[in-house]
Image: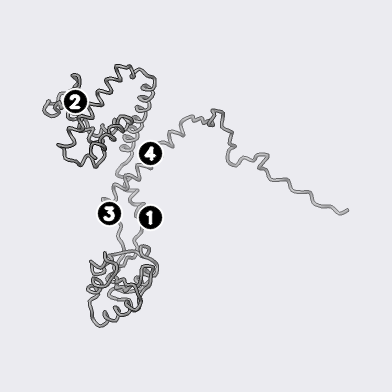
Amino acid sequence: MFARVLRVAAVSLALGGVGFTAQAQTSPAPAAGSPAGEDPVVAKVNGAEIRRSEVTRTIASLPPQVQQMPPQMIFPAVIDQIINGKLVAEAGYKANVQNDPEVAERLKRSEERIVQELYLTREVQKRITAERLQEAYNKFKEENPPQDEVKASHILVESEDVAKSIIADIKKGDDFAKIAGEKSTDKAAAQQGGDLGYFTKDQMVEPFANAAFAMKPGDVSQTPVQTQFGWHVIKVVDRRQSTPPSFEEVQEQLRSQVSEQVIGELVEDLRGKAKVERFQMDGSPMPETPPAGTVTPDSAAPAPAAPATKP
């Protein structure tokens, strides 16, 4: 299984060298002049050295299930794949494939993609300021105002009669949590004594939510509540207003959101300054689109008819 996954990954790297090159940048090679012990030679192919850093970068580009395998298993196999790749590349150079126009075209496309990525990354880093993130957080809080929350427990059963019997037992003093653990068909909540935690009204099905939010802390439903899941006996434990997550809790979400905004603004600005010409699939000119609000002969409203005159 391991060998097959590794072979597939090796072919993927061979056919998609661009992606591998970009990923490899995340594991930088040791700086020039670093002691040999920090990046030892682990193999040679016709005299050409393969260093440990190259093996490490290759492993980092492989599927997660391969990366998690023991190093003593994966390291020799990856070295073999790198050796195979070096031999194939060497054969390709001997066949002068590097002079093929397709190589130059692929390199050009690869360089363009890498330039795009680096430019956008650096521009986003410059434009995402603490002030902009704080503005995004303030907007997030405005769009997600505090909501009423209820903390409740429930006992879910299959019939109304069983639910009524449970309500009667609770009124006699039987423990709600104990009954939930023994009889509730909601096994996940039953393990917690029926506890559902805090929830907002829109997080529960309507009959259940309406009943729970009409109750006060300490109340147990006087009649069973039916939903598509069965019959519920509800106990409300607490009520409160939700509090928004802290800035630190949503910081990465905000950073991702602002990054998308920055990239959109940047591209829009570049397009606004550029002369962009578009053509149809066959290369012929695109039909002209009249400016918004322009009245064309086809779209003009018909002239009103002359008033009728008496004979």
Q: Secondary structure at mark 2?
A: strand
Query: Looking at the rendered structure, which numbered label has been put on residue 263?
Result: 4
Q: Nearer the viewer, mark 4 or mark 2?
A: 2
At which x and y percent is residue 170? Answer: 26, 79
N-terminal label among 4 and 2: 2
**Relative to the observer, which residue lies in front, 264 or 68?**
68
Amino acid on which disc 1 is placed? Glu
> Does residue 273 lie above or below 227 as drawn?
above
Residue 50: mark in rendering = 2
**Of circles 3 and 2, which is in front?**
2
| Residue positioned most to the bottom | 172
Find disc 3 in the rendering and name its residue. Answer: 246
Q: Is residue 181 above or below residue 123?
A: below
Residue 86 badge: none
SS at circle 3: loop
Between 76 and 221, the residue placed more toward the observer is 76
The numbered mark, 4 or 1, whose residue comes first in the sequence reads 1
Give the Cα separation between the discs numbered 2 and 1. Answer: 55 Å
Eye-nearest disc, 2 or 1:
2
The front one of 69 and 234 is 69
Q: Earlier in the sequence, mark 3 or mark 2?
A: 2
266 to the left or right of 77: right
- Between discs 4 and 3, the one toward the N terminus: 3
Is disc 4 in contact with disc 3, using a CB cutoff of under 8 Å?
A: no
Which percent across, then down, holds residue 23? 28, 34
- Report the amino acid beneath label 2: Ile
